[in-house]
Image (spheres, rainbow, N blue to C red):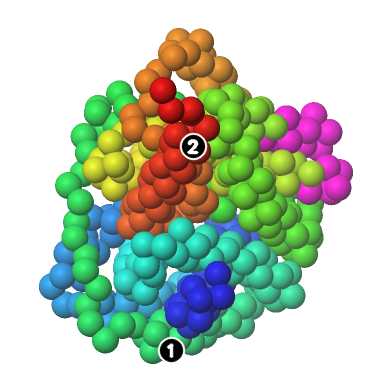
Amino acid sequence: MIAVLRSSWALLLGIFMLMIGNGLQGPLLGLRGEAEGFSTFDISMVMSAYSVGFLLAARVAPRMLRNVGHVRVFSALASLISAILVLYPAIADPWAWVAMRVIIGFCFCGVYITAESWLNDLATNENRGKALSLYMIAQMAGIVLAQYILATGDVGGFIIFIVPSVLVSLSFAPILLSATNHTPAFETTKPMALRRLIAASPLASVGVFLLGSVFSALMGMSAIYGARAGLTVPQISTMIAVAYALPLLAQYPLGWISDRVDRRLLVAVLASTGTLGAILSVVVPGQFWLILLSAALVGGATNPLYALLIAHANDYLDRSDMAAASGGFMFINGLGAIAGPFAVGWMMDGIGPGGFWFVIAVFLGLLGAYALWRMRAAPDRTIVGARGVYTPIAQQATALAAGAAQEAAADAAGLRAVSMGEVQDQETPDD
């Protein structure tokens, strides 16, 4: 781990600062839009627009990297991010914000792909899994810190928008200075047909769609919920921070468990836990400590569930298909992320702030029920090759990072299988 930090600390620092900017803009725009008098539908459009841009960049950014190079792509896209962050308060119009969110979603995806390819280039086969884990920690830590910046700022002012813009600009230095002196190898993997992906793992395909909706609701609509539920800005930022901090702590123990039980059962347990957490704040609204508990249970289930579903899918895929599958899962997750804010906004308009938790409870409840049904419908599915190893993957990771994580997991699974085989050989007496 120390060796990984020594070689990639500057890149991780840059990602950390980028994620502060990204983690701040969603809740900040929600609160500012509410203050500007935007309708629920307007804010839902603004929140969904980010995912539209993100999905577009997943297709276009690799071509840009091949045509003009990593340094130029990163510099151009990060500059656009920095500029748009200070344009939000200057143009307080919902349709302008929708356009800017599409652009900023595109740019963030592009800079993630660029940074992840550099991280891949710095890592070796032996430490790639650790490097990706540190990358995920840097992402989550940046999002959590962003909430405390939100709590101390004035959402009605201009300074709070300048802070993330400056941090994004400052992130250029460590990332560009840590870049390798040659262009990292970057090859676009041929995408897997969605029909084939769904056939390989129906549970993972349905699950990542539902989790995309839950994640986008937490990322974008939680500030609207908090404002309409009467929470203060510090309380809203604490709620969001709790939802992101707990997954960081839960990933590794849950990963250890997932490698030793039927993953579908663990999916059902985690989804049910998140469902229960969301229902608590629907049944007993207005209690801040209960809202924090709901955020902890929902957040603690959602991110580990994503990585768990990817590990489950890997059990039924050839290693050569894993990178292509990661792109397919990212696309399905993105579709869910586009739909999530609209579902939450519609329900909040219908039944009030509790609609936020109600929609999350429905999505996670459907996932838990489907996981149990899959256990009954296909109890003895044949695993392809060695059973996969759980690897932490953040939902905002691009297909490049997810594919690298899956390859690291496949390596770990292969090594474990070899090790177990060697132990069995040693324990079996010669004839």
Q: Position of residue 263 (x, y in %)?
A: 54, 29
Residue underneath mark 1: 173
Q: Quadrant of residue 65?
A: bottom left
Pick whichever, 327 or 156, lies toward us.
327
State the mark number for residue 275.
none
- Is the residue marked by circle 1 packed among few (<14), some (14-19), or many (20+) residues within 10 Å? some
Note whether residue 242 is visible.
yes
Which segment is the magenta one? 274-292
Q: Quadrant of residue 336?
A: top left
Residue, disc 2? 426
- In the image, residue 250 lies at what x, y percent? 67, 48
Q: Residue at x 49, y 37 (%)?
A: 426
Residue extending furthest left?
67
15 or 254, nearer to the observer: 254
Q: Which amino acid, by three-letter code, is at mark 2? A: Gln
Residue 394 pos. (x, y %)? 50, 53
* Outermost residue toward the top in this view: 377
Q: Give the residue type that dot 1 points to.
A: Ala
Marks 1 and 2, how far apart in space?
Answer: 53 Å
Which quarter of the rendered picture does the N terminus lie within?
bottom right
**Residue at 25% in and 73% down:** 184
Q: Is 47 inside the magenta-drawn segment?
A: no
The relative height of residue 204 versus residue 212 in the rendered view (above or below) is above
Residue at 34% x, 83% y: name it. Answer: 179
Give the secondary structure at mark 1.
helix
Side of 291 relative to 38 (left or right):
right
Asked if the magenta segment contains residue 283, the reply would be yes
**Secondary structure type for disc 2:** helix
Question: Number of marks in the image?
Answer: 2
